[in-house]
Amino acid sequence: MTDEPSDPTRKAIVRHVRLTAQEDVLFAGFCQDAGITVSEGFRRLARSASLLGPTFSGEARAEVVALTRQVRAIGVNLNQAVHHMNAGHVVRGEDVSEWLGDAYQAIVELDALYRSLCSRSRRRAIEAVEAPAP
């Protein structure tokens, strides 16, 4: 009998962190203001510091969702075009070309947004680590 693969998103690793009372109060306040748990705050810092990319929230999340929705809609159009072609119908080359151009542009925008968010997140993490203690 083989073991079933575990859920890769399961949070099974526990790290213990020692903080001063002031650090704890300030970080807990930061997390409360952001509407996240302290554990989520530490996970976000760890993701950012280890180059896994930022956790998207707020306006950044809305931008990523909007661009992803555009790519999905274009994919649906292309899928429908392929179904029509497979059924023997004629699909205008100009339409397919336009959909591919739209898909390319949305992917370029999504990539640029993601890269800028990652670099900003990484820069903030480095600044936070290098900042002198209060």
Image: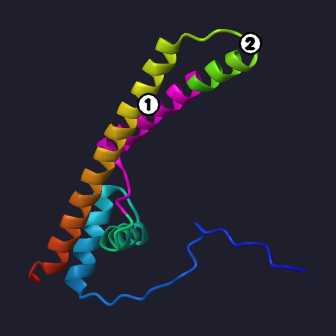
Residue 68 within the segment the image draws in magenta? yes
Picture residue at 32% right of the left edge, 38% below the top: 109
Q: Identify residue for label 2.
A: 88
Q: Identify residue for label 1.
A: 103
The amino acid type found where label 2 is placed reads Gly
- Residue 6 in the image: state x and y as whole percent: 70, 72
Picture residue at 42% right of the left edge, 72% below the top: 39
Q: Is residue 122 left or right of residue 36?
A: left
User: Where on the picture, by quarter, is residue 63?
Assistant: top left
- Residue 19 in the image: state x and y as whole percent: 28, 87
Residue 61 vertical placement versus 76 (above, below): below
As rendered, which of 29 and 126 lies closer to the eye? 126
Q: Mark 2 and 1 residues: CB-CB less than 8 Å, in contact?
A: no
Q: Is residue 11 left or right of residue 97?
A: right
As rendered, which of 84 and 51 lies closer to the eye? 84
Crowding around mark 2 (Cα neighbors within 10 Å: few <14, some 14 to 19, many 20+) is few
In terms of sequence position, does the residue under pointer 2 or pointer 1 come before the other?
2
Q: Which residues are magenta?
A: 53-77
Magenta-drawn stretch, dominant element (helix, strand or loop) = helix
Identify the image quadrant of the N terminus: bottom right
- Residue 61 in the image: state x and y as whole percent: 37, 44
Residue 76 within the segment the image draws in magenta? yes
User: Where on the picture, by quarter, is residue 54?
Assistant: bottom left
Q: How far is mark 2 from mark 1, CA to CA? A: 24 Å
Q: Is residue 133 left or right of residue 1?
A: left
Residue 7 vertical placement versus 107 (above, below): below
The amino acid type found where label 1 is placed reads Ala
Q: Secondary structure at mark 1?
A: helix
Picture residue at 74% right of the left edge, 12% below the top: 88
Identify the image quadrant of the C terminus: bottom left
Which marked residue is nearer to the observer: mark 2 or mark 1? 2
Q: Secondary structure at mark 2?
A: loop
